Image (cartoon, rainbow, N blue to C red):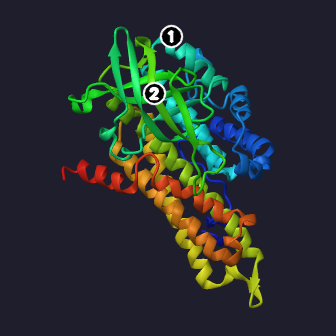
Amino acid sequence: MATADVLKPDFAAPRRHFIFTDEHEQLRESISRFVTRELAPHVEEWEEKTFPDSVFARMGELGFLGLDKPTEYGGQGGDYYCSLVLAEELARAQCGGLSMGVAVQTDMTLPPILKFGTEEQKQRWAVPGIAGRAILCLGITEPDAGSDVSGIKTRAVRDGDDWVINGSKTYITNGHRAHAIVLVTKTDPEAGYDGFTLLLVPMDTPGVVREKRLRKLGMHASDTALLAFQGVRVPGSAVLGEVGKGFYHIMWELQGERLIGAAGAVAGAQDVFDRTLRYALERRAFGRAIGHFQVIRHKFAEMATKIETARQMVYTTAWRFANGEYPVREITIAKLYAARIAVEVADECIQIHGGAGYMREYGIERAWRDLRLNRIGAGTDEIMLDVIGRSYGL
């Protein structure tokens, strides 16, 4: 074989995993243009004030809130991989709070409404939710119940045909702007995991109190609320799914949330990697670009290895999920690993930038602050480790 015929590595070749088609790549380009033109220019302002409700309306208008949702409810009828594309491309806005606020709508609240809801509930909340006319939030965490979902104290007591709710929720993304909440309540304190029920509660119902806008380390562009429910009365038709099956309904929802979160974490890590690589090729010290020093070159090699490992794990697990499997162990592993490496990468990128990485104008410190939540939200590292360990019968 002639030397000229030997296949040579092409490190600049565009990568495409086998799960993605030409249609997915066209979608990617469309979302990327939207992010670049309509979102990214406003990120600095939104970090100070939170992003406006008009983002939901605009994304609904473009069809981005219902990419994988049924066409009969206004969705685009796409596959699960479309959600991955959206999560990855939103990361290009370099605004974790924006991505999280949108994900609550697309991957945390709409899925259980569409899967467990009545036709009336779908028409009332899923249709306007997909269109961006209604904003939704999810109420799980409480002041005394975070990772331990079974410790939830918010009670819903049957009173005739109605339910009366008392309790509180905290760390609720979209809580100040939402029109409705998918609320996890305890309806039978003696029934263990069979004593939870989901309720779809309009946020303008008397007794719903948006108590406090919480201040956070990162994710500044999203609003996060402390909510109180004081004698809130809702009709029996507010039950989402089956009475007593709320714990199982929400555990199902968490699997999709965790996998999308893992994809977003990988994309966030890739973005901060790319920005830091450009910096390392431009920044000069001791007569040459810092990226050409072995110590820096090896940092990039380590980061690239971790990012690619996490990416392949997420894609392969997504393929199994999209093909009808329910790979909870693999989803949990992907979420744990992607969240961890994203924080590691962001931290290393701060180090490579040196003092500049600690300054706000470069946006690298914001990437670290935003990505750090991935190791807590949708299941802490510790809970993920326990789920994985228990899956082996330990």
Instruction: Determine whether the residue tagged by mark 2 lies in a helix, strand or loop.
Output: strand
Query: At 73% from the left edge and 68% from the top edge, which residue is drawn?
Result: 278
Residue at mark 2: 230
Q: Does 309 sit left or right of 82 as displayed? A: left
Asked if the residue under mark 2 is in contact with the one under mark 1, i.e. CB atoms within 8 Å, the reply is no
Residue at mark 1: 120
Query: At 46% from the left edge and 56% from the top edge, which residue is drawn?
Result: 375
Give percent across and percent down for residue 264: 56, 49
Say few, some or many: other residues with alpha carbon within 10 Å of mark 2 (under 14 / 14 to 19 / 20 or more). Answer: some
Q: CA distance from mark 1 to mark 2?
A: 26 Å
Ranked by sequence position, the earlier of labels 1 and 2 is: 1
Q: Quadrant of residue 7?
A: bottom right
Nearest to the observer: residue 332 or residue 362? 362
Q: Is residue 367 visible?
A: yes
- In the picture shown, does residue 186 fall above or below 38? above
Nearest to the observer: residue 257 or residue 162? 162
Q: Quadrant of residue 355?
A: bottom right
The three-letter amino acid code for the residue at tag 1 is Glu
Nearest to the observer: residue 281 or residue 24? 281
Q: Does 334 sit left or right of 100 as displayed? A: left
Which numbered tag is attached to residue 234? none
Query: At 72% from the left edge and 46% from the top edge, which residue is drawn?
Result: 49
Give percent across and percent down for residue 167: 41, 32
Instruction: Determine whether the residue tagged by mark 1 lies in a helix, strand or loop.
Output: helix
